[in-house]
Structure formats: structure tokens, C-alpha cells
Amino acid sequence: MSSPSKNRYAKLPGRGRRRRTGVTASPAFTKGYLGEDHLLVVESDGFLEKYKRFYFKDIQAIVVQKIPYWRPTIYVTHIGLVLLLILAALTDSAIQIVMVVLSIVVGLMVSIDALRGKLCFTEIRTSVQKDQLAFMGRWRVALKCLQILKPLIEAAQPQPVPNPDHASQTSVENR
């Protein structure tokens, strides 16, 4: 009989695709899990899984930056949608049906992306590394995860000790 596992993980909200440089055969998807004293990030591309563990006591910062909605990919998608509709208006009936169907598909993709919420870039920093948290790629998801992580990180971090010299100088200045 096997003993129950000591490490129990709770899945954090969100999943995302990690931005990689260069040409890759398959994208890497990431998910976040909450451990007892650490954050576990699992990156999987279908063939290989990588696990990264960030202990709460070592985390120095989690930086979240909003990405503007009107990024270049949205411009290209909208231009493609307009071109498909123009081609549909100028062509014969058989090709016209194909163009209308393609424009509906592109329009649905843009609408779904807009409904999923604003994008953001999230990065975790420790004293020795910084890494992207792609599973927190939407603004609402990042805020939910931060609400969960912030108290755990603060509890694991040592509290700053007040400097007695600084306290006495402050009290003298206030008199």
C-alpha cells in the first residue's frame, strides 16, 4: 500500500501559452499549482513537461503589465476580416459563400478573444532568476491568482525588523 502524498496541489486559475523565441514545432502550455510552501509551474508541449518550483520565501516580486488590446495581431485580423468581406462582395456565388464563411470564422475568433478579457504579461522574480508566468496571461486571471498568492507570500517572508537607531532619530525629530 502506498502512503498518501505529502504534497497536495491546488490548481490556480488560468492556463496560457508561453512565448518562446525562435521556431518551435509545438507551443508550450503552462499551468500553475499551489503547494504548501511553493508555487509550481508546469510547462508542457505535449511531449515534454518541465516543472519549476518557486518557494514563497524566495519570491521577491510578481510583476503584472497590461498589454494594449489594439496590438499588431488585432490589426492584422481586422484587416483580414475586411479583405475577406470585400472579396466576398466582388466574387461569384461559390467563392462568395467560402469568403463569407471565412469572415464569420475570423469575426468569431476576434470576438472570443475580446470576451476573454484584457491580456497581460506576468513575470515572477526571485534573487536568482526571473521567469514568465504564462498561465496568468489575462488580467482577471492574474488578479485572482495574486489574491490567492499574496497572503501566502507575505506569511512566508520574514517581517522587517525596525532599526532602533532610526526609531530614536524619528522620535527626536518629532519633538
Image (cartoon, rainbow, N blue to C red):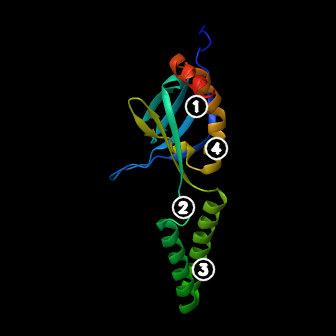
* Snapshot quadrant of residue 92: bottom right
SS type, badge 1? strand
Q: Nearer the viewer, mark 4 or mark 1?
A: 4
Disc 3 residue type (three-letter): Val
Point out the frontmost of discs 3 and 1.
Answer: 1
Determine the CA span between mark 3 and mark 2.
Answer: 29 Å
N-term mark: 4 or 1: 1
**Which residue was labeled with disc 4?**
143
| Dot in front, 3 or 2 | 2
> Pointer 2: residues within 10 angstroms few (<14), some, or many (20+)?
few
Q: Which residue carries the number 3 mark?
A: 100
Q: Given the current orientation, which residue lies at the most extreme front position?
A: 175
Q: Position of residue 47 (x, y in %)?
A: 42, 39
Quadrant of res 158: top right
- Answer left or right for 130 relative to 85: left
How crowded pointer 1 is (Cα within 10 Å; few <14, some 14-19, many 20+) is rated as some
Q: Counting other residues with Cα less than 10 Å from the Cα at mark 4, is it few (<14), some (14-19), or many (20 or more)?
A: few
Q: Are marks 3 and 4 in contact (CB under 8 Å)?
A: no
Looking at the rendered structure, the kind of residue marked 2 is: Pro
The residues tagged by marks 4 and 2 sit, at their Cα atoms, a distance apart of 17 Å
Residue marked by disc 1: 33
Residue 46, given in percent of the width and then of the height, sits at 46, 41
Which quadrant holds the C terminus? Answer: top right
How many other residues sit within 10 Å of disc 3, few (<14), some (14-19) or many (≥20)?
Answer: some
Quick check: can you spot residue 9? no
Mark 2, residue position: 68
What residue is shown at x 50% (from left), y 65% (from top)? 71
Q: Which of the two labelled residues, at mark 3 and mark 2, occupies the earlier sequence position? A: 2
Q: N-terminal of the two: label 1 or label 2? A: 1
